[in-house]
């Protein structure tokens, strides 16, 4: 039976990717494809995790200048080069270093399917829950636990080399842990 959820899923998956990157992250492709291959689920957004430097004009996401974004591990030289380039261009606002984990939004056919997926997901990702509930569908949000956020520069201050190297070390460690969890999640999805 071709119902409303199936039609919504087909229509949604035909849409152009409107993300800043314009494509699915390499580390999320298998997860997204597997979810979308299941008749009772589809992804509405995904990010496998990233390390970014943001010039924060305000707390609003659309008012931030993304001066570095990498969907993988990073090294100290990439960070310092980016900060120095932006200092030369006159940093006017705070620059934040952020290591962000996996985030997925998954539309589910109904509450029963959402609960089934949520129960299994919480064995790996504690930050998982229902963010939308209607007669049409249920949407789950899954967010990894591994994250780092701190200021590293402004117009008068730049964090010292030792501190930045430590940030890079911990961010890369978190990124590796996040990637392992994605692998474990993939195994759960295969059995779903």
Image (tube, rainbow, N blue to C red):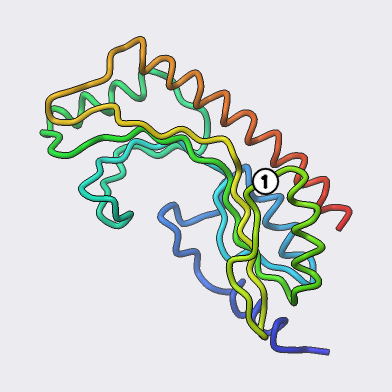
Image vertical order of residue 142 relative to residue 169, above or below: below
Disc 1 crowd rating (10 Å Cα; few below 14, some 14-19, many 20+) is few
Residue to which mark 1 is pinned: 126
Q: Residue at x 73, y 60 (%)?
A: 35
Q: Is residue 40 left or right of residue 138?
A: right
Location of residue 20 in the rendering, given as x and y in whole percent from the top left corner:
40, 55
Q: Looking at the image, which residue sits at the far top? A: 162
Image vertical order of residue 76 relative to residue 56, above or below: above
Q: Secondary structure beneath disc 1?
A: loop
Location of residue 158 in the rendering, given as x and y in whole percent from the top left corner:
22, 21
- Badge count: 1
Q: Nearer the viewer, residue 131 or 162?
A: 131
Where, by quadrant of the figure, is residue 155 drawn? top left
Q: Is residue 24 left or right of residue 19?
A: right
Q: Residue at x 40, y 15 (%)?
A: 165
Q: Residue at x 64, y 30 (%)?
A: 177
Q: Residue at x 31, y 40 (%)?
A: 54
Location of residue 90 in the rendering, given as x and y in whole percent from the top left corner:
10, 33
Image vertical order of residue 77 relative to residue 21, above or below: above
């Amino acid at each position: 039976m071709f119902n409303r959820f199936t039609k919504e899923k087909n229509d949604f998956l035909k849409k152009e990717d409107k993300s800043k990157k314009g494509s699915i992250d390499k580390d999320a492709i298998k997860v997204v494809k597997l979810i979308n291959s299941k008749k009772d689920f589809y992804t509405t957004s995904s990010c496998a995790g990233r390390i970014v430097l943001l010039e924060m004009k305000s707390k609003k996401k659309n008012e931030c200048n993304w001066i570095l974004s990498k969907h993988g591990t990073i090294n100290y030289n990439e960070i310092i080069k980016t900060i120095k380039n932006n200092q030369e261009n006159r940093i006017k606002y705070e620059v934040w270093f952020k290591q962000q984990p996996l985030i997925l939004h998954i539309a589910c056919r109904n509450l029963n399917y959402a609960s089934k997926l949520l129960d299994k997901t919480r064995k790996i990702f504690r930050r998982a829950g229902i963010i939308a509930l209607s007669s049409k569908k249920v949407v789950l949000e899954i967010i990894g636990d591994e994250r780092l956020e701190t200021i590293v520069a402004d117009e008068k201050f730049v964090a010292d080399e030792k501190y930045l190297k430590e940030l890079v070390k911990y961010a890369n460690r978190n990124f590796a842990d996040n990637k392992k969890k994605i692998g474990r999640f993939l195994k759960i999805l295969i059995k779903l």
